[in-house]
């Protein structure tokens, strides 16, 4: 099945390039561009979203969801917890002034992704209620053989995963825990963790890429007293920006390429419409003062290289799992799918200006800065919180974990795996509750993969280039460059890590939380769907 000659040639060519994938500003993705998403390819099927006028729609604010009461659940060991009942349903919203309402799936009613707010150490119960129609709004692929768990599954099955949350196994959103229309699932989120910018999204086996694309995502902001005391910009000066890309068909509806257009499976999705909070290239009126921007890359596949069009710097104050120890000043930040960033931007020196948030050459949105001077009592402390770096000597075990791709005889990617194992294969990673381990993620592919571990948080140790050819020959790790420590903006707690090609990325993971079967996977949703996802087991 594997085209060895082709792979060896490509891997040897990549051998000397791996070290160049790291920069002072962040990690640069070697994005595979083989996916045929060019305008010529979709000329007869999609409209050219680049021709839509930019900055004509105001940025929608997230719909804040409120609990409907207090509830207990003996099965979840939840007592007097705030209770949410969330219908999952089809809605229609204009994603641009010049487009008709598009059919979408949603956890709420408005055009923007919803927002849950919770308090540290106060658990909540959420009843996820599937009210979706029986037929999906996007073309449904036939399920590959490895997705045995989806046999007889309805098209619009779903299960919600609270990404970045430390939760009991039954509430994690395990891919095989899907449920269909007219069914529901009650989940308990204990919130026994630090304040952080989390998000919720669909995770149903084999269809999560379609359900997320259709709109099943939202914020979950976990707030704590320690962070509240820092006097950071808050309320209307705290903006939530979910950024993703989409394509539209000639009728202005969401377009996801059907499988025959993309070969055996869609390797990635890259759309020509950049969307923020449900609108294509919106604008936002801001005052000439400091703002806190919570940003999540919720694209299926696209990496974002974030910068401000006027070249001004911003301060990174947090990542996936909460605040950093100190602000990090940057002018450019690369976010992989599912990564979050907490930024402070000072607009006080740009009164009356229009500043674009961009990703390389792509416009994402526009900030229209007011011309008046305003009072700003918020502060940017030099010390945000104390983060103790885990010593490598604390690790009870080190594991070598490979990221793999196998090609057909004609050179097309057929399957992507972790540790050369399929999802259905027996569990090979069995960890002990409260043990700390070092995972060396050995990337043997041509892509940068954002790897996510469920239930736990971790710290990034370092990255080091190696000879892929040597490893494929005899599984020997021959390093070709120095060990590069994690950059400052990655020195906090993480739950997604970018793993460049030809590089060993090391993370140190305390497996604290709950026993049970969880998973780790690539968060490029098309890769995850093609078996780049594996279970791991936590034992007490």
Image (cartoon, grey):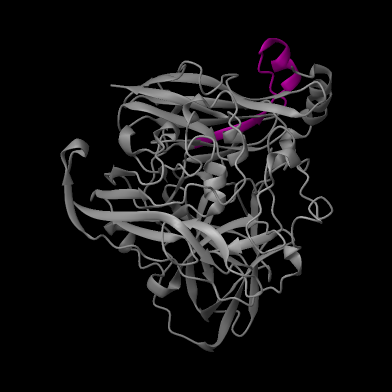
Position of 112 with respect to 266 (left or right) is: left
Q: Which residues fall within the magenta stretch?
A: 460-480
Find residue 347 and report its horizontal and vertical position in percent. Answer: 55, 76
Q: Residue 527 location, x and y as percent? A: 62, 35
Q: Quadrant of the N terminus?
A: top right
The answer to whether residue 524 is seen in the rendering is: no
**Residue at 71% over, 74% down:** 53
Q: Is residue 375 above or below residue 33?
A: below
Q: Residue furthest bottom?
A: 372
Q: Tell whether 56 sits left or right of 16.
A: left
475 drawn magenta? yes
Residue 237 lies in quadrant: bottom left
- Residue 341 in percent (x, y) is at 51, 54
Q: Residue 11 sits in which quadrant?
A: top right
Residue at position x 76%, y 55% from top?
Answer: 45
Quarter of the image that includes the C terminus: top left
Residue at 28% in and 44% down: 186
- Residue that lies at the very extreme toward the front in this rendered image: 134
Location of residue 393 by image quarter: top left
Residue sitting at the far top: 474
Residue 450 included in the magenta stretch of the image: no
Q: Is residue 247 visible?
A: yes
Q: Is residue 426 left or right of residue 248?
A: left
Q: Considering depth in this image, is 30 or 375 the residue closer to the camera?
A: 30
């Amino acid at each position: 099945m594997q085209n060895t000659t082709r792979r060896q040639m490509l891997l040897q060519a990549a051998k000397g390039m791996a070290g160049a994938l790291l920069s002072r500003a962040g990690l640069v993705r070697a994005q595979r561009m083989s996916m045929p998403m060019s305008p010529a390819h979709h000329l007869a099927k999609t409209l050219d979203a680049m021709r839509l006028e930019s900055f004509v729609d105001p940025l929608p604010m997230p719909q804040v969801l409120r609990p409907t009461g207090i509830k207990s659940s003996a099965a979840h060991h939840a007592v007097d917890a705030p209770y949410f009942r969330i219908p999952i349903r089809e809605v229609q919203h204009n994603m641009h002034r010049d487009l008709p309402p598009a059919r979408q799936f949603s956890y709420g009613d408005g055009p923007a992704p919803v927002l849950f707010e919770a308090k540290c150490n106060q658990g909540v119960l959420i009843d996820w209620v599937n009210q979706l129609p029986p037929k999906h709004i996007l073309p449904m692929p036939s399920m590959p053989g490895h997705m045995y768990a989806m046999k007889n599954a309805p098209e619009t099955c779903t299960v919600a995963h609270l990404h970045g949350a430390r939760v009991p196994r039954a509430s994690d959103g395990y891919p095989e825990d899907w449920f269909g229309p007219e069914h529901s699932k009650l989940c308990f989120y204990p919130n026994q963790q630090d304040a952080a910018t989390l998000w919720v999204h669909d995770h149903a086996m084999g269809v999560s890429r379609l359900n997320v694309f259709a709109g099943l995502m939202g914020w979950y902001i976990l707030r704590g007293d320690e962070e509240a005391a820092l006097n950071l910009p808050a309320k209307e000066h705290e903006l939530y920006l979910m950024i993703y890309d989409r394509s539209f068909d000639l009728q202005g509806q969401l377009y996801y390429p059907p499988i025959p257009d993309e070969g055996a499976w869609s390797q990635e999705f890259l759309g020509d419409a950049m969307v923020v909070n449900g609108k294509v290239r919106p604008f936002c009126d801001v005052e000439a003062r400091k703002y806190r921007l919570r940003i999540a890359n919720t694209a299926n596949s696209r990496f974002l290289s974030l910068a401000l069009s006027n070249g001004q710097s911003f301060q990174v104050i947090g990542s996936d799992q909460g605040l950093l120890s100190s602000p990090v000043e940057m002018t450019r930040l690369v976010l992989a799918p599912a990564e979050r960033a907490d930024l402070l931007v000072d607009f006080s020196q740009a009164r009356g200006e229009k500043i674009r948030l961009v990703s390389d050459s792509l416009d994402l949105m526009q900030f229209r800065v007011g011309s008046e001077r305003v009072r700003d009592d918020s502060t940017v402390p030099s010390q945000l919180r104390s983060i103790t770096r885990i010593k490598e000597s604390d690790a009870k075990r080190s594991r070598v974990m490979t990221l793999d791709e196998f090609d057909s005889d004609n050179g097309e990617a057929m399957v992507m795996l972790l540790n050369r194992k399929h999802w259905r294969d027996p569990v090979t990673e069995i960890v002990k509750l409260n043990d700390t381990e070092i995972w060396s993620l050995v990337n043997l592919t041509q892509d940068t993969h954002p790897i996510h571990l469920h239930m736990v948080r971790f710290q990034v140790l370092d990255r080091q280039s190696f000879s892929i050819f040597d490893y494929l020959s005899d599984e020997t790790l021959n390093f070709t460059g120095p060990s590069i420590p994690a950059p400052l903006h990655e020195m906090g707690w993480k739950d997604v890590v970018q793993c460049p090609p030809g590089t060993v990325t090391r993370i140190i993971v305390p497996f604290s939380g709950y026993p049970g079967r969880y998973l780790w996977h690539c968060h490029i949703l098309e890769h995850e769907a093609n078996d780049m996802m594996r279970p791991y087991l936590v034992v007490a």
